[in-house]
Amino acid sequence: MCTVAHSDPSASSVVDGGLSDEFAVPSHVEDVKKLMVEFAERHGSAGRRVVLITSGGTKVPLESRTVRFLDNFSSGRRGASSAEYFLYSGYAVIFLHRHRSLYPYSRLYTGVNLLDSLRLETDKDNGQVLVDQKALPNIATVLKSYQAVKATGLLLPVEFNTLSEYLHLLKAAAQALSSIGSKAMFYLAAAVSDFYIPASEMPEHKIQSSNGPLQISMKMVPKMLNPLVKDWAPQAFVISFKLETDPSILLERARRALDIYNHQAVVANVLDTRRGYVVVVTKDTQHELVLTDEEVQNEVEIEERIVSNLTKAHSQFMSQV
Ligand code: PMT
């Protein structure tokens, strides 16, 4: 049995926008921040918009020498495919993703065993290795897009492993993007854990099953949307996501998030139908985006619709500031 005790969210530290000492700053954050600052300035001064996409789930360890952890379902597909559509739309993209979650372009081949798609031209060990294009559909087109994006420096991938890394890198990204004002968009598609065990309360060694049933008490993770909208990037266009399993509470939860954080839009989705149906909710509007069965068969992706809706809303937002 596992019992999770809920504690008062306001009890979590609000020092430094909610990032307390519990989330020590990872050593590489300053270096990554410099890269993001340079990226934002380069693209901003070229007149380009920049989107920061968060993608994937988070792992929360139960022991400091971690054997077990709490995880969630997120594959990172929403974030990875959206990155491609933003790139097609002319945005530069900072892709803040969980290590080993889906990645733009290569995501299309995750189900393929690479070795099954290759063959040797001759028996010699140093001979050419050839690709079976039937095993990797559209590989030439996809490879061209990927290489073009790399050559033009339009994609800056940034990885996180731990919750702490995610929180600090998001803050660093927000500060880096503040220099381009309303040209920055935040597209927060990551499924971030709401609960964690503080390092000071975590057992060092593997929890022993011989001690009987496990009871876990977890603290609330500070919501980053609050300082992001208010302090770190107040001029940016900010989109959060809301996932529910009960469709009847989805829109109310999305509207509540808009009221609390005062940002521009929430993309609301339900776990089982998230690949074919979302609602983009703003203070005054509500747009349902739906894929028909035929579109699903033709491999149309809902992210294309989401990105198209949001890039138009971003243009409108920029023209009003
Ligand atoms: O990755 P896939 O398998 O393709 O699935 C995509 C998705 C379902 C994960 C995605 O579409 C989605 O809905 N992501 C948000 C999940 C969610 O409901 O998050 P939340 O309610 O915990 O957080 C709400 C928003 O605040 C999110 O935008 C989140 O990124 C952000 N957040 C959350 C926690 C935190 N500490 N700080 C945050 O900023």
Image: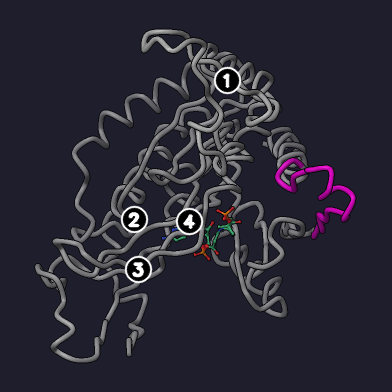
Q: CA distance from mark 1 to mark 2?
A: 50 Å
Q: Which residue is mark 4?
A: 225
Q: Badge 4 local density, few (<14 within 10 Å), some, or many (20+)?
A: many
Q: Nearer the viewer, mark 1 or mark 2?
A: 1
The disc, 1 or 2, on the residue closer to the chain's N-terminal end is 2
Q: Say whether residue 131 is left or right of residue 285.
A: left
Q: Which residue is mark 2?
A: 17
Q: List x then y, in percent, for residue 192.
A: 44, 59
Q: Which residue is mark 1?
A: 131
Magenta region: which residues? 286-304
- Whether 26 is drawn above or below 214: the answer is above
Q: In this rendering, is residue 273 above or below 157? A: below
Mark before the other along the chain sequence, 2 or 4: 2
Q: Nearer the viewer, mark 4 or mark 3?
A: 3
Ligand 1: does it lie within 8 Å of the C-beta at label 4?
yes
Three-letter amino acid code at the position of disc 1? Val
Label 2 beta carbon within 8 A of ligand 1: no
Report the front residue among 175 and 119.
Answer: 119
Instruction: Give the Cα separation between the discs numbered 2 and 4.
Output: 10 Å
Q: Earlier in the sequence, mark 3 or mark 1?
A: 3
Q: Are marks 4 and 3 in contact (CB under 8 Å)?
A: no
44 or 193: nearer the eye?
A: 193
Label 3's element?
strand
Q: Which residue is mark 3?
A: 70
Residue type marked 2: Gly
| Element at label 4 | helix
Q: Residues within 10 Å of mark 3 (few under 14, many from 20)?
A: few
